[in-house]
Image (cartoon, helix red, strand yellow):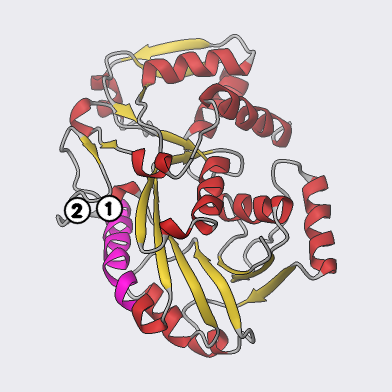
Amino acid sequence: MSEKLLVIGGTYFLGKAFVSLMLRETDCEITIMHRGTSKPSGGSEGDAKADAFEDYKKSGRLKEILADRHDGSAIREIREERFDAVIDFCAYIKEDISFLLDRLSATIGRYIFISTVDVYERGLGRFLNEDAQFETRTIGGAAGDYIAGKVALEGEIRSACERKGCTYTVLRPAIIFGPDNYAPREGMYFHWILNAGQILHPVDADGEFQLVYVEDVAKAIKLVLENEKAANSAYNVCENKMITYESFAKCLAEISGTEFTRLDITLDVVNEKGLPLPFPLTKAESNYYDGSRLAELGMEYTDMNSAMKHTYLEYVRRNK
């Protein structure tokens, strides 16, 4: 796969995992456009990966453009005749996609937008495929703004790509975990285990959720890049397997190799104290997403315990 890719973002968490995967497993050339707040180096192999990124820069396979995606003049200055694909990790608000494509002078083959399963209508209590109704209600708060932004972007991507003369693919991951995760999810539990020898466990929670390993989402992007059938389509990125607080606690016990105490608490205590547990606590709050369409393209997922163990060991290494 010898292609030119423009990655918007790409210096942290999922974007970095994708860039690393593509440099490692293909001969593509990657240009990363980012604001310079973090660098496309480091990661699960630490200094070794940082050195590898520097080597890719020296070879010409990895380039950086320091620019804000909302700076139209900077976008027009990108001097490439063609990018086989644009992979957009940081489109969050209405018109982010249109603004970029309308000002990018290079010809584009495919535009890949990283959306989220949160765009779907909530609380339906059944598995939702990619044709399900989007959320139209105002949810409020930062989470509501995030969802509204992604819904708006999904509404504009087809027309923006038609104007640009390119195809598109939308990927909607479930809850992502893995090394470099900036969201307080699995890392919260790792911190408790290592520093307190215990975890808070909502003993009467019946909520269910779907997790997906960051490396698997990176693989999903590579998969749709290499498959023409994925053009002008959307895919949920998740397995049709539900996780509970109970099964998650058991996973942590198996992968940590550390004895810790489960401090059982009730939902009443969680609500009374406003404890910020990271996953849905009740079935009423739970949502279910169908990943069958991506599986039909050949998507396979890493075993949950193996992925969580690698994530835990990386957390331990970085927090010694």
Q: What residue is shown at x 50% (from left), y 56% (from top)?
A: 227
Q: What residue is shown at x 66% (from left), y 60% (from top)?
A: 1
Residue named by callout 1: 119
Q: As shown in the figure, which amino acid type bears the numbered disc 1?
A: Val
Q: Earlier in the sequence, mark 2 or mark 1?
A: 1
Q: Quadrant of the C terminus?
A: top right
Q: Residues within 10 Å of mark 1 (few under 14, many from 20)?
A: many
Residue 226 rendering spot, x and y as whole percentages: 55, 56
Count numbered badges in the picture: 2
In the image: residue 253, left or right of residue 115: right
Q: Is residue 44 visible?
A: yes
Front residue (pair 242, 68)? 242
In the image: residue 148, left or right of residue 161: left
Q: How far is mark 2 from mark 1, CA to CA?
A: 6 Å
Label 1 residue SS: helix
Reply yes or no: does residue 178 show up in magenta. no
Q: Which residues are magenta?
A: 142-160
In the image: residue 85, left or right of residue 267: right
Residue named by callout 2: 135
Q: Is residue 114 visible?
A: no
Residue 46 rendering spot, x and y as whole percentages: 76, 44
Q: Residues within 10 Å of mark 2 (few under 14, many from 20)?
A: some
